[in-house]
Image (cartoon, rainbow, N blue to C red):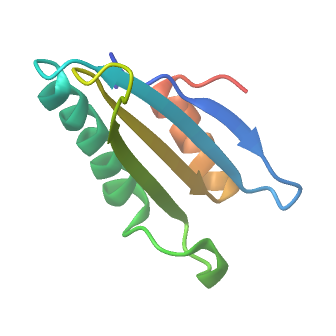
Amino acid sequence: MQLHYLDFDFSDEESGRGSFDAMASVDPARLPALRAEVAAVLDWAGRTFGPAGALQDESEWDYELQSMAEPDHPALTTLTLTLSGSPAFCEAFRQEFAVAD
């Protein structure tokens, strides 16, 4: 799947789990497209690895999504998305979204 707004950075843990972080700032006209891209990523993760859940409960993946209006640029909205997961999740995510280490 090709992403147009989200550019993920990967970080790993000694446990083998890892996380992918992305941030995008858009004007109101592009916000629906950014939200649709976030939804597509989360939909892929849910279809491929089941529902999100706390990693300490042995879930394959989880996520955090935040949105805020930029105080210095009120016409921009910034979304941040973090996905964390098992080694299998991380490998599949890298392949699906072409994320380098």
Which of 13/2 is in front?
13
Q: Position of residue 36 (x, y in %)?
A: 18, 35
Which of 54/88 is in front?
54
* The image quarter in which residue 86 lies: bottom right
Question: Residue extending furthest bottom?
Answer: 57
**In which quadrant of the rendered image does the N terminus lie?**
top left
The residue at the point 54 percent across, 75 percent down is: 54
- Whether residue 66 is situated above or below residue 49 in the rendered picture: above
- Whether residue 43 is situated above or below residue 7 in the rendered picture: below
* The image quarter in which residue 49 lies: bottom left
- Whether residue 29 is situated above or below residue 97 in the rendered picture: above
Question: Residue extending furthest right?
Answer: 14
The residue at the point 36 percent across, 29 percent down is: 70
Q: Position of residue 24 (x, y in %)?
A: 40, 25
- In screen coordinates, is 29 left or right of 51? left
All told, the count of numbered labels is 0
The residue at the point 17 percent across, 19 percent down is: 30
Q: Position of residue 74 (x, y in %)?
A: 26, 24
Q: Position of residue 75 (x, y in %)?
A: 21, 20
In this orientation, does residue 2 appear? no
